[in-house]
Image (cartoon, rainbow, N blue to C red):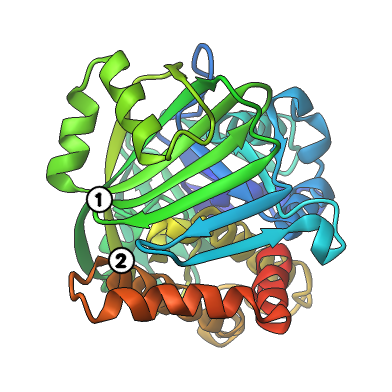
Amino acid sequence: MQHFDLIIVGGGLAGASLAVALRDSSLRIALVEAQPPRRPEGWDARIYAVSPANVAFLDAIGAWRHLDQQRIAPIAAMKVFGDASGALEFSAFETGVADLGCILESSLVACELWEGLKRQSNLQLFAGQKPAALEFRDEVAVLRLADGETLSAALLVGADGRDSWVRAAAGLPAHNRHYGEKGVVANFAIARPHRNIAWQWFGDEGVLAYLPLAGQRMSIVWSAPDALADELCQLSPEALCERVERAGHGVLGKLDLLTPAQAFPLRLMRVPEIVARRLALVGDAGHGIHPLSGHGINLGFQDAQALAERLLAARAWEDIGDLRFLQGYQRARREEIALLQTTTDALRRLFAAPSPLLRPLRNLGLNFTNRLPVAKSVLVRYALGGF
Protein backbone atom coordinates (compact mmCIF):
# COMPACT_ATOMS: atom_id res chain seq x y z
CA MET A 1 0.00 0.00 0.00
CA GLN A 2 1.31 3.45 -0.96
CA HIS A 3 0.52 6.24 1.49
CA PHE A 4 -0.07 9.88 0.58
CA ASP A 5 -1.42 12.95 2.35
CA LEU A 6 -4.00 13.57 -0.37
CA ILE A 7 -5.59 11.48 -3.13
CA ILE A 8 -7.47 13.24 -5.94
CA VAL A 9 -9.72 11.08 -8.10
CA GLY A 10 -10.37 12.86 -11.38
CA GLY A 11 -7.93 14.87 -13.45
CA GLY A 12 -10.45 17.23 -15.04
CA LEU A 13 -10.21 20.98 -14.67
CA ALA A 14 -11.26 21.15 -11.00
CA GLY A 15 -9.13 18.22 -9.85
CA ALA A 16 -6.07 19.17 -11.89
CA SER A 17 -6.20 22.83 -10.85
CA LEU A 18 -6.47 21.78 -7.19
CA ALA A 19 -3.37 19.60 -7.53
CA VAL A 20 -1.39 22.31 -9.34
CA ALA A 21 -2.43 24.89 -6.72
CA LEU A 22 -0.74 22.64 -4.12
CA ARG A 23 2.49 22.24 -6.08
CA ASP A 24 4.61 24.17 -3.56
CA SER A 25 3.11 22.53 -0.49
CA SER A 26 4.62 19.74 1.60
CA LEU A 27 1.63 17.51 0.82
CA ARG A 28 2.31 14.21 -0.93
CA ILE A 29 -0.39 13.91 -3.59
CA ALA A 30 -1.69 11.09 -5.75
CA LEU A 31 -3.92 11.87 -8.73
CA VAL A 32 -5.95 9.09 -10.36
CA GLU A 33 -7.32 9.76 -13.85
CA ALA A 34 -8.73 7.07 -16.14
CA GLN A 35 -8.68 9.23 -19.31
CA PRO A 36 -5.97 11.90 -19.49
CA PRO A 37 -6.94 14.91 -21.63
CA ARG A 38 -5.83 15.24 -25.24
CA ARG A 39 -6.04 17.99 -27.81
CA PRO A 40 -8.42 17.32 -30.72
CA GLU A 41 -7.54 18.30 -34.24
CA GLY A 42 -8.83 21.74 -35.14
CA TRP A 43 -11.02 23.50 -32.61
CA ASP A 44 -12.54 21.87 -29.56
CA ALA A 45 -16.35 22.07 -29.60
CA ARG A 46 -16.46 22.10 -25.78
CA ILE A 47 -15.67 25.66 -24.70
CA TYR A 48 -15.88 27.56 -21.43
CA ALA A 49 -16.44 31.14 -20.35
CA VAL A 50 -13.85 31.77 -17.63
CA SER A 51 -14.40 34.73 -15.30
CA PRO A 52 -11.61 37.25 -14.59
CA ALA A 53 -11.39 35.94 -11.01
CA ASN A 54 -10.61 32.47 -12.31
CA VAL A 55 -8.21 33.79 -14.94
CA ALA A 56 -6.36 35.27 -11.95
CA PHE A 57 -6.51 31.90 -10.17
CA LEU A 58 -5.11 30.06 -13.21
CA ASP A 59 -2.41 32.70 -13.53
CA ALA A 60 -1.51 32.39 -9.84
CA ILE A 61 -0.95 28.65 -10.20
CA GLY A 62 1.20 29.18 -13.30
CA ALA A 63 -1.14 27.83 -15.96
CA TRP A 64 -2.62 30.87 -17.71
CA ARG A 65 0.64 32.34 -19.01
CA HIS A 66 1.46 29.11 -20.86
CA LEU A 67 -1.83 28.95 -22.78
CA ASP A 68 -1.88 29.82 -26.47
CA GLN A 69 -3.29 33.34 -26.28
CA GLN A 70 -4.15 33.19 -30.00
CA ARG A 71 -6.91 30.71 -29.14
CA ILE A 72 -8.48 32.82 -26.37
CA ALA A 73 -11.19 35.44 -26.97
CA PRO A 74 -11.99 38.13 -24.40
CA ILE A 75 -15.63 39.11 -23.87
CA ALA A 76 -16.05 42.85 -24.36
CA ALA A 77 -19.85 42.90 -24.04
CA MET A 78 -22.86 40.65 -23.64
CA LYS A 79 -26.34 41.09 -25.09
CA VAL A 80 -29.26 39.08 -23.69
CA PHE A 81 -32.68 38.98 -25.37
CA GLY A 82 -35.97 37.66 -24.03
CA ASP A 83 -38.70 35.93 -26.00
CA ALA A 84 -40.52 39.18 -26.76
CA SER A 85 -39.06 42.69 -26.59
CA GLY A 86 -36.93 42.26 -23.47
CA ALA A 87 -33.20 43.03 -23.66
CA LEU A 88 -30.29 43.37 -21.25
CA GLU A 89 -26.76 44.52 -22.15
CA PHE A 90 -23.47 44.42 -20.26
CA SER A 91 -20.30 46.19 -21.33
CA ALA A 92 -16.74 45.90 -20.03
CA PHE A 93 -16.10 49.51 -21.08
CA GLU A 94 -19.10 50.84 -19.12
CA THR A 95 -18.07 48.76 -16.11
CA GLY A 96 -14.51 50.07 -16.24
CA VAL A 97 -12.76 46.73 -16.71
CA ALA A 98 -10.66 45.22 -19.49
CA ASP A 99 -13.13 42.44 -20.25
CA LEU A 100 -16.03 40.47 -18.76
CA GLY A 101 -14.26 37.14 -19.08
CA CYS A 102 -12.60 34.92 -21.66
CA ILE A 103 -13.81 32.17 -23.99
CA LEU A 104 -11.44 29.25 -24.46
CA GLU A 105 -11.46 25.59 -25.36
CA SER A 106 -11.81 23.04 -22.57
CA SER A 107 -8.95 20.92 -23.87
CA LEU A 108 -6.62 23.93 -24.11
CA VAL A 109 -6.54 24.52 -20.37
CA ALA A 110 -6.98 20.83 -19.48
CA CYS A 111 -3.86 19.81 -21.41
CA GLU A 112 -1.81 22.67 -19.95
CA LEU A 113 -2.79 21.68 -16.41
CA TRP A 114 -1.95 18.05 -17.21
CA GLU A 115 1.51 19.03 -18.44
CA GLY A 116 2.02 20.87 -15.17
CA LEU A 117 1.04 17.77 -13.22
CA LYS A 118 3.65 15.72 -15.05
CA ARG A 119 6.37 18.07 -13.81
CA GLN A 120 5.07 18.38 -10.24
CA SER A 121 7.59 16.98 -7.75
CA ASN A 122 5.15 16.32 -4.88
CA LEU A 123 2.63 14.45 -7.05
CA GLN A 124 2.41 10.91 -8.42
CA LEU A 125 0.15 10.36 -11.42
CA PHE A 126 -1.90 7.21 -11.85
CA ALA A 127 -2.88 7.81 -15.47
CA GLY A 128 -5.18 5.35 -17.19
CA GLN A 129 -6.18 3.87 -13.83
CA LYS A 130 -9.74 3.41 -12.59
CA PRO A 131 -10.86 3.25 -8.94
CA ALA A 132 -12.39 -0.07 -7.88
CA ALA A 133 -13.11 0.11 -4.13
CA LEU A 134 -13.14 2.76 -1.42
CA GLU A 135 -12.96 2.33 2.34
CA PHE A 136 -12.89 4.93 5.08
CA ARG A 137 -10.96 4.07 8.22
CA ASP A 138 -10.39 6.14 11.34
CA GLU A 139 -7.10 7.61 10.18
CA VAL A 140 -7.13 7.20 6.39
CA ALA A 141 -9.18 6.72 3.25
CA VAL A 142 -8.13 3.60 1.37
CA LEU A 143 -8.58 3.43 -2.41
CA ARG A 144 -8.07 0.25 -4.39
CA LEU A 145 -7.44 0.65 -8.10
CA ALA A 146 -8.68 -1.67 -10.82
CA ASP A 147 -5.17 -3.07 -11.34
CA GLY A 148 -5.06 -4.12 -7.66
CA GLU A 149 -2.79 -1.36 -6.37
CA THR A 150 -3.91 0.19 -3.08
CA LEU A 151 -3.47 3.82 -2.01
CA SER A 152 -4.22 5.52 1.30
CA ALA A 153 -4.36 9.14 2.42
CA ALA A 154 -5.64 11.38 5.19
CA LEU A 155 -8.00 13.00 2.66
CA LEU A 156 -9.56 11.82 -0.59
CA VAL A 157 -11.02 14.37 -3.03
CA GLY A 158 -13.69 13.40 -5.56
CA ALA A 159 -13.24 15.46 -8.71
CA ASP A 160 -14.66 12.89 -11.11
CA GLY A 161 -17.65 14.71 -12.59
CA ARG A 162 -21.42 14.65 -12.28
CA ASP A 163 -21.64 10.87 -12.37
CA SER A 164 -19.00 10.72 -9.65
CA TRP A 165 -17.84 7.22 -8.73
CA VAL A 166 -16.36 8.62 -5.52
CA ARG A 167 -19.60 10.28 -4.44
CA ALA A 168 -21.55 7.07 -5.02
CA ALA A 169 -18.94 4.87 -3.32
CA ALA A 170 -18.98 7.16 -0.28
CA GLY A 171 -22.78 7.06 -0.08
CA LEU A 172 -23.27 10.82 -0.43
CA PRO A 173 -26.72 11.47 -1.95
CA ALA A 174 -27.24 13.62 -5.03
CA HIS A 175 -30.67 14.95 -5.94
CA ASN A 176 -31.11 15.27 -9.71
CA ARG A 177 -33.82 16.95 -11.73
CA HIS A 178 -33.58 16.48 -15.47
CA TYR A 179 -34.60 19.46 -17.58
CA GLY A 180 -35.65 17.40 -20.59
CA GLU A 181 -33.04 19.38 -22.52
CA LYS A 182 -29.64 18.82 -24.05
CA GLY A 183 -26.84 21.31 -24.48
CA VAL A 184 -25.87 21.36 -28.17
CA VAL A 185 -22.37 22.68 -28.89
CA ALA A 186 -20.63 23.39 -32.19
CA ASN A 187 -18.15 25.88 -33.67
CA PHE A 188 -18.62 28.02 -36.75
CA ALA A 189 -16.71 30.34 -39.05
CA ILE A 190 -18.59 33.62 -39.34
CA ALA A 191 -19.03 36.21 -42.09
CA ARG A 192 -19.26 39.27 -39.82
CA PRO A 193 -16.82 40.17 -37.00
CA HIS A 194 -18.21 39.30 -33.57
CA ARG A 195 -16.38 42.27 -31.99
CA ASN A 196 -15.91 40.07 -28.90
CA ILE A 197 -19.63 40.28 -28.07
CA ALA A 198 -21.44 37.31 -26.54
CA TRP A 199 -25.11 36.97 -27.49
CA GLN A 200 -27.87 35.04 -25.76
CA TRP A 201 -31.50 34.50 -26.74
CA PHE A 202 -34.30 33.04 -24.61
CA GLY A 203 -36.99 31.63 -26.85
CA ASP A 204 -39.57 28.94 -27.47
CA GLU A 205 -36.80 26.58 -28.62
CA GLY A 206 -34.67 26.96 -25.50
CA VAL A 207 -31.67 29.20 -24.77
CA LEU A 208 -29.14 29.90 -27.52
CA ALA A 209 -25.77 31.53 -26.87
CA TYR A 210 -23.26 32.79 -29.43
CA LEU A 211 -19.82 32.93 -27.80
CA PRO A 212 -16.86 34.63 -29.53
CA LEU A 213 -13.83 32.54 -30.39
CA ALA A 214 -10.47 33.89 -31.53
CA GLY A 215 -10.55 35.24 -35.09
CA GLN A 216 -13.59 34.98 -37.35
CA ARG A 217 -15.12 32.14 -35.35
CA MET A 218 -17.79 31.60 -32.77
CA SER A 219 -19.18 28.75 -30.68
CA ILE A 220 -22.76 28.00 -29.74
CA VAL A 221 -24.32 26.50 -26.64
CA TRP A 222 -27.96 25.79 -27.44
CA SER A 223 -29.93 24.46 -24.47
CA ALA A 224 -32.71 22.83 -26.46
CA PRO A 225 -35.55 20.40 -25.70
CA ASP A 226 -34.42 16.81 -26.20
CA ALA A 227 -36.26 16.28 -29.49
CA LEU A 228 -34.91 19.50 -31.00
CA ALA A 229 -31.39 18.78 -29.77
CA ASP A 230 -31.45 15.36 -31.41
CA GLU A 231 -32.77 16.92 -34.61
CA LEU A 232 -30.01 19.55 -34.63
CA CYS A 233 -27.31 16.90 -34.25
CA GLN A 234 -28.72 14.96 -37.22
CA LEU A 235 -28.87 17.91 -39.62
CA SER A 236 -26.43 18.23 -42.49
CA PRO A 237 -23.72 20.88 -41.96
CA GLU A 238 -25.48 23.24 -44.35
CA ALA A 239 -28.88 22.78 -42.71
CA LEU A 240 -27.41 23.20 -39.22
CA CYS A 241 -25.68 26.43 -40.22
CA GLU A 242 -28.93 27.76 -41.67
CA ARG A 243 -30.89 26.78 -38.55
CA VAL A 244 -28.38 28.36 -36.15
CA GLU A 245 -28.08 31.48 -38.30
CA ARG A 246 -31.86 31.90 -38.33
CA ALA A 247 -32.15 31.34 -34.55
CA GLY A 248 -29.47 34.00 -34.01
CA HIS A 249 -31.30 36.51 -36.23
CA GLY A 250 -28.36 36.61 -38.64
CA VAL A 251 -26.26 38.85 -36.36
CA LEU A 252 -22.99 37.26 -37.54
CA GLY A 253 -24.00 36.68 -41.15
CA LYS A 254 -23.46 33.42 -43.01
CA LEU A 255 -22.12 30.54 -40.92
CA ASP A 256 -19.84 27.66 -41.92
CA LEU A 257 -19.55 24.63 -39.65
CA LEU A 258 -16.11 23.94 -38.15
CA THR A 259 -16.92 21.13 -35.71
CA PRO A 260 -19.83 18.65 -35.75
CA ALA A 261 -22.66 19.33 -33.32
CA GLN A 262 -22.51 17.40 -30.04
CA ALA A 263 -25.16 17.20 -27.32
CA PHE A 264 -25.11 16.39 -23.61
CA PRO A 265 -28.10 16.07 -21.25
CA LEU A 266 -28.82 18.90 -18.83
CA ARG A 267 -29.86 18.46 -15.23
CA LEU A 268 -29.87 20.30 -11.95
CA MET A 269 -27.93 18.38 -9.31
CA ARG A 270 -27.90 19.31 -5.65
CA VAL A 271 -25.55 17.52 -3.25
CA PRO A 272 -26.57 18.36 0.34
CA GLU A 273 -23.15 17.53 1.80
CA ILE A 274 -19.96 17.95 -0.23
CA VAL A 275 -17.76 16.78 2.65
CA ALA A 276 -17.63 13.79 4.97
CA ARG A 277 -14.91 12.41 7.19
CA ARG A 278 -11.80 11.92 4.98
CA LEU A 279 -13.70 13.12 1.89
CA ALA A 280 -14.35 16.33 -0.07
CA LEU A 281 -16.00 16.90 -3.45
CA VAL A 282 -15.00 19.58 -5.97
CA GLY A 283 -16.37 20.63 -9.34
CA ASP A 284 -19.21 18.78 -11.01
CA ALA A 285 -18.97 15.94 -8.48
CA GLY A 286 -20.48 18.35 -5.93
CA HIS A 287 -23.00 20.35 -7.98
CA GLY A 288 -24.66 20.76 -11.35
CA ILE A 289 -26.32 23.86 -12.80
CA HIS A 290 -28.01 24.88 -16.05
CA PRO A 291 -25.40 26.25 -18.51
CA LEU A 292 -27.34 29.44 -19.28
CA SER A 293 -25.20 31.42 -16.80
CA GLY A 294 -21.91 30.00 -18.08
CA HIS A 295 -20.71 29.60 -14.49
CA GLY A 296 -20.42 25.83 -14.16
CA ILE A 297 -16.67 25.71 -14.76
CA ASN A 298 -16.15 28.83 -12.65
CA LEU A 299 -17.78 27.13 -9.68
CA GLY A 300 -15.37 24.23 -10.13
CA PHE A 301 -12.30 26.47 -10.21
CA GLN A 302 -13.55 28.32 -7.13
CA ASP A 303 -14.05 24.98 -5.34
CA ALA A 304 -10.44 24.08 -6.14
CA GLN A 305 -9.16 27.46 -5.00
CA ALA A 306 -11.15 27.38 -1.74
CA LEU A 307 -10.02 23.87 -0.84
CA ALA A 308 -6.41 24.60 -1.79
CA GLU A 309 -6.42 27.69 0.43
CA ARG A 310 -7.85 25.63 3.28
CA LEU A 311 -5.19 22.94 2.90
CA LEU A 312 -2.32 25.41 2.54
CA ALA A 313 -3.42 27.21 5.71
CA ALA A 314 -3.64 23.99 7.75
CA ARG A 315 -1.37 23.88 10.79
CA ALA A 316 1.09 21.02 11.17
CA TRP A 317 -0.97 19.40 13.92
CA GLU A 318 -4.31 19.60 12.08
CA ASP A 319 -5.86 16.51 10.50
CA ILE A 320 -6.86 17.59 6.98
CA GLY A 321 -9.33 14.70 6.75
CA ASP A 322 -11.17 15.57 9.95
CA LEU A 323 -14.79 16.49 9.34
CA ARG A 324 -14.57 19.70 11.37
CA PHE A 325 -11.62 20.83 9.26
CA LEU A 326 -13.44 20.06 6.01
CA GLN A 327 -16.65 21.78 7.10
CA GLY A 328 -14.82 25.09 6.76
CA TYR A 329 -14.44 24.38 3.05
CA GLN A 330 -18.11 23.42 2.76
CA ARG A 331 -19.23 26.61 4.49
CA ALA A 332 -17.05 28.68 2.17
CA ARG A 333 -18.70 27.18 -0.92
CA ARG A 334 -22.27 26.40 0.10
CA GLU A 335 -23.82 29.84 -0.29
CA GLU A 336 -22.47 30.62 -3.76
CA ILE A 337 -23.37 27.18 -5.12
CA ALA A 338 -26.91 27.41 -3.75
CA LEU A 339 -27.35 30.96 -5.07
CA LEU A 340 -26.29 30.09 -8.61
CA GLN A 341 -28.30 26.88 -8.70
CA THR A 342 -31.43 28.66 -7.53
CA THR A 343 -30.98 31.64 -9.85
CA THR A 344 -30.26 29.71 -13.03
CA ASP A 345 -33.01 27.21 -12.31
CA ALA A 346 -35.52 30.00 -11.69
CA LEU A 347 -34.54 31.79 -14.90
CA ARG A 348 -34.88 28.64 -16.97
CA ARG A 349 -38.26 27.85 -15.43
CA LEU A 350 -39.45 31.42 -15.97
CA PHE A 351 -38.59 31.50 -19.67
CA ALA A 352 -39.65 27.90 -20.29
CA ALA A 353 -43.15 28.55 -18.93
CA PRO A 354 -45.60 28.81 -21.88
CA SER A 355 -48.04 31.08 -20.04
CA PRO A 356 -48.95 34.14 -22.15
CA LEU A 357 -49.31 36.12 -18.90
CA LEU A 358 -45.68 35.55 -17.94
CA ARG A 359 -44.19 36.53 -21.31
CA PRO A 360 -44.64 40.33 -20.94
CA LEU A 361 -43.63 40.23 -17.27
CA ARG A 362 -40.33 38.41 -17.78
CA ASN A 363 -39.39 40.64 -20.71
CA LEU A 364 -40.34 43.71 -18.70
CA GLY A 365 -37.98 42.44 -16.00
CA LEU A 366 -35.07 42.34 -18.46
CA ASN A 367 -35.80 45.86 -19.68
CA PHE A 368 -36.24 47.16 -16.13
CA THR A 369 -32.91 45.66 -15.03
CA ASN A 370 -31.23 47.11 -18.12
CA ARG A 371 -32.30 50.60 -16.99
CA LEU A 372 -30.95 50.16 -13.43
CA PRO A 373 -27.19 50.85 -13.36
CA VAL A 374 -26.87 49.61 -9.77
CA ALA A 375 -28.55 46.26 -10.53
CA LYS A 376 -26.47 45.81 -13.67
CA SER A 377 -23.31 46.65 -11.73
CA VAL A 378 -24.09 44.00 -9.11
CA LEU A 379 -24.60 41.37 -11.81
CA VAL A 380 -21.41 42.31 -13.64
CA ARG A 381 -19.33 42.47 -10.47
CA TYR A 382 -20.46 38.98 -9.54
CA ALA A 383 -19.57 37.68 -13.01
CA LEU A 384 -16.14 39.29 -12.73
CA GLY A 385 -15.16 38.27 -9.24
CA GLY A 386 -17.42 35.52 -8.02
CA PHE A 387 -19.34 35.58 -4.79
Please identify the quadrant where the C terminus is shown: bottom right
Residue at the image point whose x is 57% and y is 85% from the top: 331
Give the image quarter of residue 228. top left
Residue 30 appears in the picture as rendered: no
The type of residue carrying mark 1 is Glu
Q: CA distance from mark 1 to mark 2?
A: 19 Å
Which numbered marker is on residue 50? none
Q: Label 2, secondary structure: give it.
A: strand
Percent position of residue 349, x then y? 28, 72
Residue at the image point whose x is 80% and y is 30% from the top: 66
Q: Nearer the viewer, residue 109 or 320?
A: 109
Percent position of residue 75, x then y? 69, 46
Q: Is residue 314 above or below residue 144?
A: below
Give the image quarter of residue 64. top right
Mark 2, other Cα within 10 Å: few <14 / some 14–19 / many ≥20: some
Choose the circle earlier in sequence order: 1 or 2: 1
Residue farthest along the left direction in this orientation: 227
Residue at the image point whose x is 48% and y is 71% from the top: 278
Choose mark 1 or mark 2, whichever is in front: 1
Which numbered marker is on residue 205? 1
Which numbered marker is on residue 268? 2
